[in-house]
Image (spheres, rainbow, N blue to C red):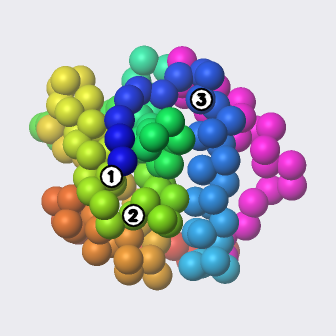
C-alpha cells in the first residue's frame, strides 16, 4: 500500500465533496437533530471552492495507491482579542473511508494539519465533536486533543 498525504486543490473538489457528504451522512445517523437544507450541494461546492483559495484554510488529502481515501480541512481563526495566544487552527472536518481506518492514516492527516498550523504561528488546534460520537472523541484524544470548553445549546 503506497500512501501519500498531500495538499488538495481545486482539481480535487469533487472527491473532497464526496467524502464530506459521507461524513455528513455519518453525522446525521449519530445525531438526528442534524439536518441539511434542500439543495445543499451547490452551496457546499461554492464554500469549498472559496476555502480552497483562502490562504487561511487548507485541505490535505490521503491518497492510497492513486485513490483519495480521506481528507482533513482546517482554517485559521482569530481568538478573543484580550486573551493571550487565543488564535487557533480550527479542524473543520476530517474523514477517512471506513476500510482505511485504524491504519495510521488519520494520524498522518492530523500531523500534516498540525504542522501547517504551526507554520502559520498558532499554538492551539481546536475541533468540535458530537457528544454522541464517542468513537471520534476517542480518536481525537489519541491524537492529543483534550476537552477544554463545552458548547451547550437549547431550543428557543
Can see residue 79? no
Please name whichever residue, 68 or 30, is drawn nearer the observer in this view of the structure.
68
Number of numbered markers: 3
Q: Image quarter for residue 112? A: top left
User: For this view, does 90 lie left or right of residue 25?
Assistant: left
Q: Is residue 146 above or below residue 29?
A: above
Q: Residue at x 27, y 56 (%)?
A: 104
> Which tag, 2 or 3, sits closer to the chain's start?
3
Q: What secondary structure is found at the residue carrying circle 3?
A: helix
Q: Residue at x 57, y 79 (%)?
A: 30
Image coordinates of residue 69 in percent, x first then y, are 50, 48
Q: What secondary structure is found at the residue carrying circle 1?
A: helix
Please name whichever residue, 108 or 44, is drawn nearer the observer in this view of the structure.
108
User: For this view, does 65 lie left or right of residue 109?
Assistant: right
Instruction: Give the crowd class for mark 3: few <14, some 14-19, many >=20 residues within 10 Å.
Output: some
User: For this view, does 8 lie left or right of residue 134?
Assistant: right
Q: Does residue 101 belong to the magenta stretch?
A: no
The magenta span reads 33-53
Q: Is mark 1 in CB contact (under 8 Å) with mark 2? A: yes
Q: CA distance from mark 3 to mark 1?
A: 18 Å
Image coordinates of residue 86 in percent, x first then y, are 21, 40
Q: What secondary structure is found at the residue carrying circle 2?
A: loop
Q: CA distance from mark 2 to mark 3?
A: 21 Å
Task: Kindly identify which residue carries mark 2.
Answer: 101
Q: Image quarter for residue 61? A: top left
Q: Is residue 146 above or below residue 134?
A: above
Image coordinates of residue 28 in percent, x first then y, are 65, 72
Task: Kindly identify which residue carries mark 1.
Answer: 105
Can see residue 40? yes
| Residue 12 badge | 3
Q: CA distance from mark 1 to mark 2?
A: 7 Å
Amino acid at each position: 500500500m503506497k500512501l501519500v498525504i498531500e495538499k488538495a486543490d481545486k482539481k480535487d473538489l469533487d472527491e473532497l465533496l464526496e467524502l464530506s457528504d459521507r461524513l455528513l451522512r455519518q453525522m446525521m445517523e449519530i445525531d438526528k437533530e442534524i439536518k441539511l437544507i434542500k439543495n445543499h450541494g451547490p452551496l457546499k461546492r461554492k464554500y469549498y471552492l472559496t476555502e480552497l483559495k483562502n490562504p487561511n484554510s487548507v485541505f490535505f488529502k490521503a491518497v492510497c495507491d492513486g485513490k483519495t481515501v480521506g481528507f482533513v480541512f482546517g482554517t485559521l481563526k482569530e481568538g478573543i482579542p484580550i486573551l493571550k495566544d487565543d488564535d487557533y487552527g480550527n479542524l473543520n472536518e476530517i474523514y477517512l473511508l471506513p476500510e482505511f481506518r485504524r491504519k495510521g492514516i488519520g494520524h498522518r492527516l492530523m500531523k500534516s494539519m498540525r504542522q501547517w498550523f504551526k507554520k502559520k504561528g498558532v499554538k492551539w488546534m481546536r475541533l468540535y465533536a458530537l457528544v454522541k460520537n464517542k468513537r471520534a472523541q476517542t480518536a481525537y484524544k489519541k491524537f492529543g486533543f483534550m476537552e477544554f470548553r463545552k458548547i451547550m445549546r437549547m431550543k428557543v
